[in-house]
Amino acid sequence: FTRNQIWWKRFVPVIGWSADSQIVVSAGSATTPSLAATRSGRLHLVWRDNRDGNNEIYYKEYTPAGGWDLVDTRLTINSASQIQPHLDADPMDNVYVVWQDNLEGNLNLRVYLARSTNGGKNFADPVDLSANTFSDAANAAIAVDGDDVHVLWTFLGAGTGDIFHTQSQD
């Protein structure tokens, strides 16, 4: 059988595209990558991976001097399913990751955010951003604009598909 894995390719002006390079090697299926770049040339990557028996969110960093981390960092640790990760980074190399979490069971999907203030070396405990939507929340997206962090998600209650927005300046 074929497992889904994550590959990388880099474009260098004048030279062109690099060769394909597998950057995530998982015993399970690694899918739905999200990539963000910073002014310092660092890349931040998150993805969904089921190598541990259920869907979890993993993180990896690229630095111009050292390349991709050799070790994958697991950001979520619970028996529920975590899917649809997205991330962005601010000019200070703070990293923000959002995802959909089924921690409370099939009928109560939530959107969580984890933040790193040291370039992805450590992440704070996740925060439930959708706690006040009273129903399923899914399809999170994130964008950082200077010091402002914006997160959107879809509220799935009563089949409405409403879109929610939250913003933080810290």
Image (cartoon, helix red, strand yellow):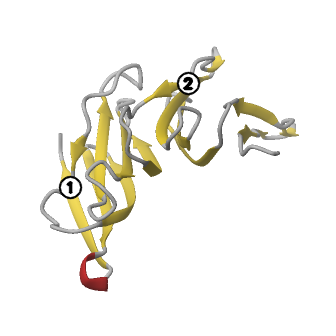
8 relative to 33 in the view: left or right: right
Q: CA distance from mark 2 to mark 1?
A: 29 Å
Which disc, if any, is residue 113?
A: none
Q: Residue at x 18, y 49 (%)?
A: 168
18 relative to 113 in the view: left or right: right
9 or 65, nearer to the observer? 9
Location of the C terminus by quadrant is top left
Which disc, if any, is residue 167?
A: 1
Q: Residue at x 64, y 14 (%)?
A: 66
Amino acid residing under circle 1: Gln
Amino acid residing under circle 2: Asp
Is the residue 157 above or below the residue 73 in the image? below
Is the residue 148 above or below the residue 89 in the image? below
Mark 2 vs 1, N-terminal side: 2
Regarding mark 1 in the picture, which secondary structure is present there? strand
User: Which residue matches tag 2?
Assistant: 72
165 relative to 32 in the view: left or right: left
**Whole-percent x and y of residue 20?**
83, 37
Q: Is residue 90 visible?
A: no
12 relative to 44 in the view: left or right: right
93 or 60, nearer to the observer? 60
Regarding mark 2 in the picture, which secondary structure is present there? loop
**Whole-percent x and y of residue 30?**
63, 42
**Whole-percent x and y of residue 164?**
24, 69
Q: Quadrant of residue 29?
A: top right
Q: Residue at x 71, y 41 (%)?
A: 5
Q: Is residue 140 visible?
A: yes
Location of the N terminus by quadrant is top right
